[in-house]
Amino acid sequence: MALRPILILPDKRLRQKAQPVAAVDDEIRVLMDDMLETMYAAPGIGLAATQIGEMKRVLVLDVAKRQEEEASAHPMAFANPEVLWTSDEFSTYNEGCLSIPEIYEEVERPARIRVGYLDRDNKRQEIEADGILATCLQHEIDHLNGVLFIDHISRLKREMISKKFIKAAKREAEDASGEPEAEAKRQSEG
Ligand code: ZN
C-alpha cells in the first residue's frame, strides 16, 4: 500500500469527470487499498479516486471510523457507483472535504439512496444507505463527476472559498519558486 498526495482546490483535476473501470482487477484493488490508506491517514471518512488524480470511477469510505476506534473500522470500496434511487425527503449535514481543508458548510441532499456498484471482487452489488453513509456516498460520487460540495452552497460563499484557495495556491507557488521579487511583494502586502 502507498500513501498518495491528495489534490487541493483549485487543482483542475478535481473538476474532471472520471471514467468507468472495465473490471475490478488487481490494479484497481491496489488503487482501492492506496485510497483507503490515504483516507485513514488524512484522516477522512471518504475519498474519491479523482482526489488523488486518478480519473477512474472508484471511491472508498469508512463512516464507522469516525470515532477513531480501530476495532470499529469498516472499510468499503466501490467501483462504477451509480445512484439508482433517491428519497423525496432530504437531510442536512455539515460537510467537509479533504480537498478543501478546514471548510465546513451545511449541505442538503436526499436522505436515503440506493446505489449499484462493483465490489472488491468485481461482483455487482446494491446498497441502500441513509444517514451519514448516504451523505458520504453522494459527496464521493459527486467527486467522480467533477462536482464539489461547495457547488451545493450559495454562490457567494462558494466564490469566497474559491478565492481563498486560489490565493493560498499562488502564495505556495511563490514560496516554491523562491523569487526575491515575490518575497518583497508579499511582505509589502503585509
Ligand atoms: Zn470531498
Image: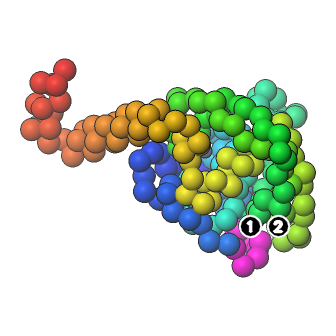
**Residue 158 shows in this picture:** no
Q: Which residues are magenta?
A: 21-28
User: Which corner quadrant holds the C terminus?
Assistant: top left
User: Which corner quadrant holds the N terminus?
Assistant: bottom right
Query: In this view of the protein, which residue sits in the foreground, 5 or 97?
Result: 97
Q: Is residue 22 above or below residue 170?
A: below
Q: Is residue 12 left or right of residue 49?
A: left
Q: Are marks 2 and 1 in contact (CB under 8 Å)?
A: yes
Q: Is residue 98 above or below residue 2?
A: above
Name the residue: 83% across, 61% down. 84
- Residue type at mark 1: give it: Asn
Q: Residues within 10 Å of mark 2 (few under 14, many from 20)?
A: many
Q: Is residue 179 left or right of residue 110?
A: left
Q: Is mark 2 within 8 Å of ligand 1?
A: no
Image coords of residue 179 (percent x, y): 14, 42
Q: Is residue 190 above or below residue 38?
A: above
Q: Which residue is mark 2?
A: 118
Q: Which residue is mark 1?
A: 80
